[in-house]
Image (cartoon, coloured by chain):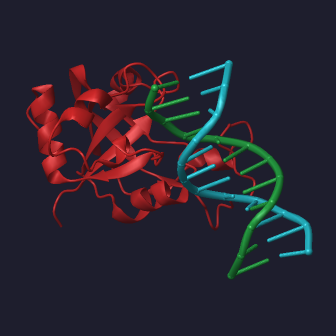
Chain colours: A red, B cyan, C green
DNA sequence: GCCAACGTTGGC
DNA sequence: GCCAACGTTGGC
């Protein structure tokens, strides 16, 4: 199946692109997704090798700060079973886990980042979910054209 | 820090 | 199955 593209939000004071880079092999598990629509994208639609933008939310500047590849098949998010985790979900069971995640691997950092304002001003990107008012889905599909245009803005070859 | 928009929960 | 109440997200 053709490669697909995604946008994944993170608050950088929780987990930033530099945190991702500092992880072993630039790889981490994308824990803490507690929204069904976002989970369904990870569980049902992501494939190993898909590309994803890393988006920093709730900071200035709001921006796409780099890219990642989806690195594994979905599996249950361990934090849902950990009573000490803020992502603990007492209603989830190991037999029937509610929350799934994937691993992601760092592929590129955009320096400077591609800001939300740039995205808003660039023809061809006006349909991106991330700039729609009221949109708060933390994992969103991105079209191949959007993937290309944002790389052009970043001055980075798509990987 | 505010607050509008959104998603989820639970009583009925 | 509806919908009010609640909690959270995230731009500003």
The mark tally for this picture is 0
Side of A126 relative to A123 (left or right):
right
Q: Residue at x 18, y 46 (%)?
A: A146
Q: Position of residue A82 (x, y in %)?
A: 69, 43
Q: Residue at x 48, y 45 (%)?
A: A136
Q: Position of residue A11 (x, y in %)?
A: 48, 29
Q: Position of residue A42 (x, y in %)?
A: 41, 56
Q: Residue at x 48, y 27 (%)?
A: A58
Q: Which quadrant of the figure has residue A41? A: bottom left
Q: Position of residue A29 (x, y in %)?
A: 44, 41
Q: Is residue A45 above or below residue A113?
A: below
Side of A74 relative to B9 (left or right):
left
Q: Is residue A90 above or below residue A118?
A: below
Please tell me which residue lies in front, C3 or A27.
C3
Please tell me which residue lies in front, A105 or A25.
A105
Q: Which quadrant of the figure has residue A88? A: top right
Side of A87 relative to A27 (left or right):
right
| Image quarter of the C terminus of chain A | top left
| Image quarter of the N terminus of chain A | bottom left
Q: Is residue A94 above or below residue A131?
A: below
Residue A159 showing in the rendered view = no
Please tell me which residue lies in front, A150 or A40.
A150
């Amino acid at each position: 199946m053709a490669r697909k593209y995604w946008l994944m939000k993170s608050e950088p004071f929780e987990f930033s692109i530099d945190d991702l880079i500092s992880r072993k092999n630039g790889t981490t598990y994308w824990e803490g997704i507690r929204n069904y629509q976002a989970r369904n994208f990870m569980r049902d639609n992501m494939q190993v090798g898909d590309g994803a933008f890393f988006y920093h939310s709730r900071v200035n500047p709001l921006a796409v700060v780099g890219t990642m590849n989806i690195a594994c098949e979905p599996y249950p998010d361990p934090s849902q079973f950990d009573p000490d985790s803020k992502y603990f979900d007492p209603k989830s069971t190991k037999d029937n886990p509610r929350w799934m995640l994937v691993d992601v691997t760092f592929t590129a950092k955009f320096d400077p980042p591609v800001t939300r304002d740039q995205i808003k001003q660039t023809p061809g990107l006006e349909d991106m979910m991330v700039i729609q008012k009221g949109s708060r889905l933390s994992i969103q599909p991105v079209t191949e054209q959007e993937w290309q245009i944002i790389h052009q803005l970043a001055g980075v070859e798509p990987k």
